[in-house]
Amino acid sequence: MIREVIVLGGGTAGFLSALTLKIKLPQLRIRVVRSRELGIIGVGEGSTSDLPYHLHGYLGLDQTRFYREAQPTWKLGVRFLWGPRPHFNYTFTPQVSSHLEGLKKPHGFHLWDDFEDADVNSALMSRGKVFARQPNGIPEIRRNYAYHIENAWMVDYFERIAIEHGIEITDATVDQVERGPEGVAALKLNTSQRITADLYIDASGFRSELLGKALAEPFVSYADALFCDRAVAGGWEREAEPILPYTVAETMDAGWAWQIEHERHINRGYVYSSAFLSDEQATEEFLKKNPKVKSTRIVKFTTGRHQRCWVGNVFAVGNAHGFVEPLEATAIFAICQATRLLAGALGENDCDISPTMRESCDRIIRKLWDEIRDFLAIHYRFNTRLDTPFWQACRHDVALHGAESIVQHYRENGPCMFAQLDVLPPSTSLFQLDGFYTLLLGQRVQHTRLHTPSPRDRETFESMRARTAVAAKNGLTVAESLAYIRHPGWKWTPGFFEK
Ligand SMILES: Cc1cc2nc3c(=O)[nH]c(=O)nc-3n(C[C@H](O)[C@H](O)[C@H](O)COP(=O)(O)OP(=O)(O)OC[C@H]3O[C@@H](n4cnc5c(N)ncnc54)[C@H](O)[C@@H]3O)c2cc1C
C-alpha cells in the first residue's frame, strides 16, 4: 500500500509529479528532495498544447496566477525552416486531416503546392499573430496553444504551489541509495538523514540516480534514428524584435537551431551531432547566425530511454527516464503524460498497485517514447534543405522504425485518412496521422496520388483559405494579447480546459 512518496528532484519533472499526485490523491504524504547545489537544467522551454490542459484543466491551477508568476508566452506551433519550401508550419490543430463539406478529398490533398494558411493557426503564425479577434476586439482564445516558458520561473511557481498543497521540500543531496527487495530501501542524504517511502519517483534529471544508477535499468538508445547528441545554447535580451507566436526550427549544417520566445528574452540553441561537428565549430556557426548572443553553454545528452520506467518501487519521469532533443518540445509532454498515468493507476488500484497495472503503465510510456523517436526520425530522413555530410547521412541512414509503415502508406495513397483504420488509429497515437502527414507534406515527400481538384473544389478550398487569411490578418499579436489578459477585468472562461 502506497502512503508515502519521495520525489527525488526539484525540476519540472519532480514538481509536476509531486503536484499531480498530491492534487489527485491528497491522502498521500509527499516529500520532494532536491539539491540546490546540483540545480535544475534551466533551459528556456517550449511545450505542446498538453501543458496548458494539464495545469489548468486536469490540475485546475488558476490561470491568472500562472500567467503572473510563471510569465509564459503562447506558442501556436513550430515554424520549420526545413525541406524545399521556404518554411512550413506545424500546428496543434488538424491542418491536413480536416475535410470541408462538399470536397472530394481532405485538406492534405490540396496542400501539395501551397502549404500556407491551411488553417487559422497556421495563418496566424504566418502573420505574427497569436489569436483571432472577436467582434468586440478581444482575443478569441482557443484551447490549441502551448507555452514558451522559462524553466526556472515555472519551477519556482510549482514550488510555491507545492508548499501550499502541503508537499514537504527537503534541500539535500542524495549521497547513497540503499537497495532492498522492492528496489530501493532508503535514501541517505548528505545531512546524514536516512529517509524511506513506499514509492520513489526518480526525477533526478540526466543523473537518473535511482532507475539508471541504483537499479541499473538498461538503456535503449535511439541513436540509430536521432544522430544529435549536443546543444550549444545562448540568447539575448529582446530589443525591437516582435514576440513570435511559435518556435522556429531552422536547419543547420549538422543539426538544427531552435528559437524560443520569452517576453523579454530570446532563447536560441543549436542541436548538433558531435560526430559531424566539434563544439568549437558548432559554436562558431551558431554565433555567426546569432550575433547578439554574448555567451554560450554546451549541453551534452544521450537520446533514448530506460527500458522500463517503473521498476519495483521506483517510477522514473522526465530526463531520469529518457531524453530526446526538443525538436517537437516533447519532454514536458512526456512528463505530463507519465504523471497523469501514474496518478490514474494509483487511483484505480486504491494505491495498492498490481503487477499488471505496473506493466500496463510501462508499456504505454514505452510506446509514447518510441512514437516520439519515430516522429522525429521523419524530420531527419526527409529534410532535403542542405547537402552537408550530416544531412546526407540522415537521408541515407536514419532508421524510421514505427514510422516506416506510415511513410509507405503515404507514398502509395497520399495523405489519406483511411490509414487511421489500420496504420495509425487515433487512440494509439500522440501525434496522430495529421502530425505525420504535416511533416511529410511540409517536406514535400513524394506520393503517387497527387490530386487535381475539380474547379468547384478548388474554389471551395481557396475561398476557405482566403477567409482564414483575413481572420488571421485581423488577429492580435502576443504583446497585444498579453495586455488583454493582464487587465484586471480579464476573466478566463470557466471550464475552458475540460476535455
Ligand atoms: C538543450 C535542451 C533544450 C530543451 N528544450 C526543451 C523544450 O523546449 N521543451 C521541453 O519540453 N523540454 C525541453 N528540454 C528538456 C527539459 O530538460 C525537460 O523538459 C525538463 O526540464 C525536465 O527536467 P527534469 O526535471 O527531468 O530534470 P532537471 O531540471 O535536471 O531536474 C533534476 C532535479 O534533480 C535534482 N537531483 C539530481 N540528483 C540529485 C541528488 N543526488 N540529490 C538530490 N537532488 C538531485 C536536481 O537538483 C534537480 O532538482 C530541453 C533539454 C535540453 C538539454
Image (tube, rainbow, N blue to C red):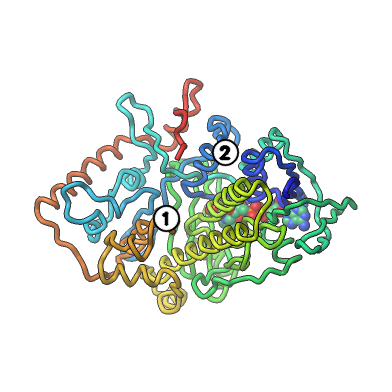
* Ligand number 1: quarter of image: bottom right
Q: Is mark 1 within 8 Å of ligand 1?
A: no
| Position of residue 47 measured from the top left corner of the image (x, y, whole percent) | 51, 49
The image position of residue 432, as x and y in percent, is: 39, 57
Q: Quadrant of the C terminus?
A: top left
- Mark nearer the viewer, 2 or 1: 1
Considering the numbered disc 1 on the image, is that residue within a helix, a strand or a loop?
Answer: helix
Give, as a three-letter code, the residue at label 2. Answer: Leu
Q: Please, which residue is most extreme toward the top here? A: 489
Residue at the farthest right position: 192
Q: Which residue is mark 2?
A: 59
Count of all numbered marks drawn on residues in the image: 2
Q: Which class describes the residues within 10 Å of circle 2: few (<14), some (14-19), or many (20+)?
A: some
Amino acid type for the residue under numbered disc 1: Ser
In the figure, 216 relative to 86: above or below? below
Please state which of residues 106 and 301 is positioned toward the viewer in this rendering.
Answer: 106
Q: Position of residue 239 (x, y in %)?
A: 50, 42
Q: Residue at x 51, y 38 (%)?
A: 57
Tell me how far mark 2 sits from mark 1, CA to CA. 23 Å
**193 vs 81, nearest the viewer:** 193
How packed is label 1: few (under 14 Cα within 10 Å), some, or many (20 or more)?
few
Q: Identify which residue, 166 or 332, lies in the foreground.
A: 166
Q: Is residue 390 above or below residue 349?
A: below
- Return the residue at label 1: 427
Q: Position of residue 399 (x, y in %)?
A: 46, 75
SS class, disc 2:
loop
Q: Quadrant of residue 375?
A: bottom left
Cβ atoms under marks 2 and 1 closer than 8 Å: no
Do we see residue 175 in this rendering? yes
Side of 345 where 214 appears, left or right: right
The residue sitting at 70% across, 53% down in the picture is 201
